[in-house]
Amino acid sequence: MLDWVTDPNIWIGFFTLVALEIVLGIDNIIFISILAGKLPPEQRDRARVLGLAAALISRLLLLFGLSWVVQLTEPLFTVLGHEISGRDLILLLGGLFLLGKSVTEIHHSMEGPSGKDGKQAAAASFASVIVQIMILDIVFSLDSVITAVGMVDELGVMIAAVVVSVAVMLFASGPISRFVDQHPTIKMLALAFLVLIGVVLVAEGLDQHIPKGYIYFAMAFSVIVELLNIRMRGRHTKQQDATPKMK
Protein backbone atom coordinates (compact mmCIF):
# COMPACT_ATOMS: atom_id res chain seq x y z
CA MET A 1 0.00 0.00 0.00
CA LEU A 2 2.98 2.26 0.64
CA ASP A 3 4.91 1.11 -2.44
CA TRP A 4 4.70 4.64 -3.82
CA VAL A 5 7.03 5.85 -1.06
CA THR A 6 9.94 3.92 -2.55
CA ASP A 7 8.97 4.50 -6.19
CA PRO A 8 11.41 7.07 -7.68
CA ASN A 9 9.05 7.79 -10.58
CA ILE A 10 6.37 8.97 -8.14
CA TRP A 11 8.82 11.33 -6.44
CA ILE A 12 10.12 12.67 -9.76
CA GLY A 13 6.55 13.33 -10.87
CA PHE A 14 5.75 14.96 -7.52
CA PHE A 15 8.67 17.41 -7.54
CA THR A 16 8.21 18.20 -11.23
CA LEU A 17 4.52 18.89 -10.65
CA VAL A 18 5.29 21.09 -7.61
CA ALA A 19 7.72 23.15 -9.71
CA LEU A 20 5.18 23.53 -12.55
CA GLU A 21 2.38 24.44 -10.14
CA ILE A 22 4.56 27.17 -8.62
CA VAL A 23 5.39 28.55 -12.08
CA LEU A 24 1.72 28.45 -13.08
CA GLY A 25 0.88 30.21 -9.81
CA ILE A 26 3.12 33.22 -10.46
CA ASP A 27 0.38 35.06 -12.37
CA ASN A 28 -2.03 34.30 -9.52
CA ILE A 29 0.39 35.80 -6.96
CA ILE A 30 0.82 38.93 -9.12
CA PHE A 31 -2.93 39.39 -9.43
CA ILE A 32 -3.49 38.88 -5.69
CA SER A 33 -0.63 41.26 -4.84
CA ILE A 34 -2.02 44.07 -7.00
CA LEU A 35 -5.57 43.69 -5.70
CA ALA A 36 -4.44 43.41 -2.07
CA GLY A 37 -2.39 46.59 -2.56
CA LYS A 38 -5.65 48.53 -3.01
CA LEU A 39 -6.64 47.73 0.57
CA PRO A 40 -5.48 49.47 3.76
CA PRO A 41 -2.07 48.11 4.93
CA GLU A 42 -3.58 46.27 7.91
CA GLN A 43 -5.87 44.22 5.62
CA ARG A 44 -3.39 43.28 2.89
CA ASP A 45 -1.83 40.23 4.54
CA ARG A 46 -5.26 38.81 5.41
CA ALA A 47 -6.44 39.33 1.82
CA ARG A 48 -3.38 37.50 0.43
CA VAL A 49 -3.84 34.58 2.82
CA LEU A 50 -7.56 34.28 2.08
CA GLY A 51 -6.92 34.62 -1.66
CA LEU A 52 -4.37 31.80 -1.71
CA ALA A 53 -6.54 29.69 0.62
CA ALA A 54 -9.37 30.10 -1.88
CA ALA A 55 -6.98 29.04 -4.65
CA LEU A 56 -6.05 25.90 -2.67
CA ILE A 57 -9.70 25.02 -2.02
CA SER A 58 -10.71 25.53 -5.66
CA ARG A 59 -7.80 23.36 -6.86
CA LEU A 60 -8.65 20.56 -4.41
CA LEU A 61 -12.35 20.67 -5.33
CA LEU A 62 -11.46 20.43 -9.02
CA LEU A 63 -9.13 17.49 -8.31
CA PHE A 64 -11.88 15.66 -6.43
CA GLY A 65 -14.19 16.39 -9.35
CA LEU A 66 -11.87 15.04 -12.05
CA SER A 67 -14.75 13.44 -13.96
CA TRP A 68 -16.45 16.85 -14.19
CA VAL A 69 -13.20 18.51 -15.29
CA VAL A 70 -12.82 15.94 -18.09
CA GLN A 71 -16.38 16.66 -19.25
CA LEU A 72 -15.52 20.35 -19.53
CA THR A 73 -13.47 19.56 -22.64
CA GLU A 74 -16.51 18.22 -24.52
CA PRO A 75 -17.98 20.67 -27.09
CA LEU A 76 -21.14 22.49 -26.03
CA PHE A 77 -21.83 24.44 -29.24
CA THR A 78 -20.11 25.77 -32.36
CA VAL A 79 -19.42 29.41 -33.26
CA LEU A 80 -18.03 30.30 -36.71
CA GLY A 81 -16.68 26.80 -37.12
CA HIS A 82 -15.06 26.72 -33.65
CA GLU A 83 -16.28 24.18 -31.12
CA ILE A 84 -16.75 25.82 -27.70
CA SER A 85 -16.50 23.66 -24.57
CA GLY A 86 -17.14 24.50 -20.93
CA ARG A 87 -13.40 24.93 -20.39
CA ASP A 88 -13.25 27.32 -23.37
CA LEU A 89 -16.06 29.43 -21.88
CA ILE A 90 -14.30 29.64 -18.51
CA LEU A 91 -11.02 30.64 -20.17
CA LEU A 92 -12.73 33.21 -22.41
CA LEU A 93 -14.67 34.87 -19.59
CA GLY A 94 -11.65 34.72 -17.27
CA GLY A 95 -9.37 36.17 -19.93
CA LEU A 96 -11.78 39.02 -20.70
CA PHE A 97 -12.19 39.74 -16.98
CA LEU A 98 -8.41 39.80 -16.51
CA LEU A 99 -7.96 42.07 -19.54
CA GLY A 100 -10.60 44.51 -18.31
CA LYS A 101 -9.25 44.56 -14.77
CA SER A 102 -5.61 44.95 -15.86
CA VAL A 103 -6.35 47.77 -18.33
CA THR A 104 -8.41 49.56 -15.65
CA GLU A 105 -5.56 49.25 -13.14
CA ILE A 106 -3.05 50.54 -15.71
CA HIS A 107 -5.32 53.52 -16.40
CA HIS A 108 -5.56 54.34 -12.68
CA SER A 109 -1.79 53.95 -12.28
CA MET A 110 -1.05 56.24 -15.24
CA GLU A 111 -3.75 58.88 -14.76
CA GLY A 112 -4.29 58.60 -11.02
CA PRO A 113 -7.77 58.50 -9.49
CA SER A 114 -9.31 61.91 -8.82
CA GLY A 115 -12.40 63.35 -7.19
CA LYS A 116 -15.18 60.88 -6.57
CA ASP A 117 -13.27 58.07 -8.27
CA GLY A 118 -10.35 58.66 -5.92
CA LYS A 119 -12.59 58.26 -2.87
CA GLN A 120 -14.08 55.08 -4.28
CA ALA A 121 -10.65 53.65 -5.03
CA ALA A 122 -9.46 54.46 -1.52
CA ALA A 123 -12.54 52.78 -0.11
CA ALA A 124 -12.07 49.50 -1.99
CA SER A 125 -13.89 46.97 0.16
CA PHE A 126 -12.25 43.85 1.53
CA ALA A 127 -15.15 41.71 0.28
CA SER A 128 -14.94 43.02 -3.31
CA VAL A 129 -11.20 42.30 -3.47
CA ILE A 130 -11.71 38.73 -2.19
CA VAL A 131 -14.52 38.13 -4.71
CA GLN A 132 -12.31 39.32 -7.60
CA ILE A 133 -9.48 37.09 -6.39
CA MET A 134 -11.81 34.07 -6.19
CA ILE A 135 -13.11 34.65 -9.74
CA LEU A 136 -9.61 34.48 -11.20
CA ASP A 137 -8.63 31.65 -8.82
CA ILE A 138 -11.16 29.44 -10.60
CA VAL A 139 -9.61 30.17 -14.00
CA PHE A 140 -6.02 29.71 -12.81
CA SER A 141 -7.00 26.57 -10.85
CA LEU A 142 -8.56 25.00 -13.94
CA ASP A 143 -5.31 25.42 -15.86
CA SER A 144 -3.34 24.09 -12.87
CA VAL A 145 -5.51 20.98 -12.42
CA ILE A 146 -5.50 20.13 -16.14
CA THR A 147 -1.69 20.28 -16.02
CA ALA A 148 -1.64 18.01 -12.95
CA VAL A 149 -3.97 15.46 -14.55
CA GLY A 150 -1.80 15.33 -17.65
CA MET A 151 1.39 14.69 -15.66
CA VAL A 152 0.50 12.35 -12.79
CA ASP A 153 -1.92 9.44 -12.44
CA GLU A 154 -2.09 9.25 -8.62
CA LEU A 155 -4.71 11.55 -7.07
CA GLY A 156 -2.80 11.62 -3.77
CA VAL A 157 0.33 12.86 -5.51
CA MET A 158 -1.66 15.61 -7.26
CA ILE A 159 -3.20 16.75 -3.98
CA ALA A 160 0.17 16.74 -2.18
CA ALA A 161 1.82 18.71 -5.02
CA VAL A 162 -0.97 21.31 -5.03
CA VAL A 163 -0.82 21.75 -1.23
CA VAL A 164 2.99 22.13 -1.24
CA SER A 165 2.97 24.58 -4.17
CA VAL A 166 0.30 26.78 -2.56
CA ALA A 167 2.26 26.73 0.73
CA VAL A 168 5.35 27.94 -1.16
CA MET A 169 3.31 30.65 -2.90
CA LEU A 170 1.85 31.72 0.45
CA PHE A 171 5.37 32.10 1.86
CA ALA A 172 6.55 34.06 -1.20
CA SER A 173 3.46 36.24 -1.67
CA GLY A 174 4.33 38.66 1.15
CA PRO A 175 7.82 39.63 -0.08
CA ILE A 176 6.60 39.75 -3.70
CA SER A 177 3.66 42.00 -2.78
CA ARG A 178 5.84 44.38 -0.78
CA PHE A 179 8.38 44.54 -3.60
CA VAL A 180 5.66 45.31 -6.15
CA ASP A 181 4.18 48.02 -3.89
CA GLN A 182 7.58 49.68 -3.36
CA HIS A 183 8.48 49.83 -7.06
CA PRO A 184 5.89 51.45 -9.38
CA THR A 185 7.72 50.27 -12.51
CA ILE A 186 7.52 46.65 -11.32
CA LYS A 187 3.79 47.11 -10.68
CA MET A 188 3.31 48.44 -14.21
CA LEU A 189 5.32 45.51 -15.58
CA ALA A 190 3.18 43.11 -13.54
CA LEU A 191 0.00 44.67 -14.94
CA ALA A 192 1.43 44.29 -18.46
CA PHE A 193 2.03 40.61 -17.66
CA LEU A 194 -1.61 40.24 -16.62
CA VAL A 195 -2.73 41.81 -19.91
CA LEU A 196 -0.54 39.29 -21.73
CA ILE A 197 -1.95 36.40 -19.69
CA GLY A 198 -5.48 37.64 -20.38
CA VAL A 199 -4.77 37.58 -24.13
CA VAL A 200 -3.37 34.03 -23.78
CA LEU A 201 -6.49 32.88 -21.91
CA VAL A 202 -8.77 34.33 -24.60
CA ALA A 203 -6.65 32.68 -27.30
CA GLU A 204 -6.81 29.34 -25.45
CA GLY A 205 -10.57 29.70 -25.19
CA LEU A 206 -10.66 30.08 -29.00
CA ASP A 207 -8.48 26.95 -29.44
CA GLN A 208 -5.42 28.99 -30.42
CA HIS A 209 -2.67 27.38 -28.37
CA ILE A 210 0.26 29.60 -27.37
CA PRO A 211 3.18 27.71 -25.73
CA LYS A 212 3.43 29.02 -22.17
CA GLY A 213 7.18 28.54 -22.19
CA TYR A 214 7.52 31.56 -24.48
CA ILE A 215 5.27 33.63 -22.21
CA TYR A 216 7.14 32.79 -19.02
CA PHE A 217 10.52 33.32 -20.70
CA ALA A 218 9.44 36.79 -21.84
CA MET A 219 8.17 37.57 -18.34
CA ALA A 220 11.38 36.36 -16.67
CA PHE A 221 13.56 38.29 -19.15
CA SER A 222 11.56 41.50 -18.58
CA VAL A 223 11.82 41.15 -14.81
CA ILE A 224 15.60 40.62 -14.97
CA VAL A 225 16.02 43.74 -17.15
CA GLU A 226 13.84 45.79 -14.77
CA LEU A 227 15.76 44.54 -11.71
CA LEU A 228 18.98 45.70 -13.38
CA ASN A 229 17.36 49.10 -14.03
CA ILE A 230 16.29 49.35 -10.37
CA ARG A 231 19.82 48.54 -9.22
CA MET A 232 21.33 51.11 -11.59
CA ARG A 233 18.87 53.78 -10.42
CA GLY A 234 19.70 52.98 -6.80
CA ARG A 235 23.42 53.25 -7.46
CA HIS A 236 22.93 56.54 -9.34
CA THR A 237 20.90 57.96 -6.44
CA LYS A 238 23.61 56.98 -3.95
CA GLN A 239 26.26 58.68 -6.10
CA GLN A 240 24.17 61.86 -6.27
CA ASP A 241 23.65 61.83 -2.49
CA ALA A 242 27.39 61.33 -1.91
CA THR A 243 28.50 64.14 -4.26
CA PRO A 244 27.58 67.13 -2.00
CA LYS A 245 29.31 65.45 0.94
CA MET A 246 32.58 65.26 -0.99
CA LYS A 247 32.43 68.99 -1.65
Image (tube, rainbow, N blue to C red):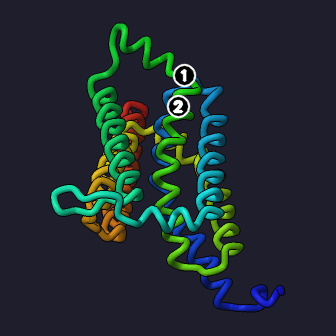
Q: Position of residue 111 (x, y in %)?
A: 27, 23
114 lies above or below 52: above
Task: Kindly identify the residue that appears in the image at 66 percent across and 47 percent down.
Answer: 53
Q: Quadrant of the N terminus?
A: bottom right
| Element under disc 1 | loop
Task: Kindly identify the residue that appears in the image at 50 percent across and 77 percent down.
Answer: 150
213 lies above or below 106: below
Residue 151, disc: none
Mark 2 — residue? 129
Amino acid on which disc 1 is placed: Ser
- In the rendered structure, are the residues bearing label 2 and label 1 in contact, judged by CB atoms less than 8 Å apart? yes
In the image, taking residue 226 as reference, residue 13 lies left or right, namely right
Q: Position of residue 62 (x, y in %)?
A: 59, 59
The image quarter in which residue 39 lies? top right
Task: Kindly identify the residue that appears in the image at 31 percent across and 37 percent down.
Answer: 100
Towards the viewer: 11 or 83: 83
The residue most toward the right is 1
Graded by Cα atoms within 10 Å as few (under 14), some (14 to 19) or many (20 or more), the crowding at tag 2 reads many
Amino acid on which disc 2 is placed: Val
| Element under disc 2 | helix
Residue 125, disc: 1
Task: Kindly identify the residue that appears in the image at 40 percent across and 50 percent down.
Answer: 231
Q: Position of residue 22 (x, y in %)?
A: 55, 63
Q: Quadrant of the C terminus?
A: top left
**Residue 101 in sight from this viewpoint:** yes
Towards the viewer: 174 or 126: 126
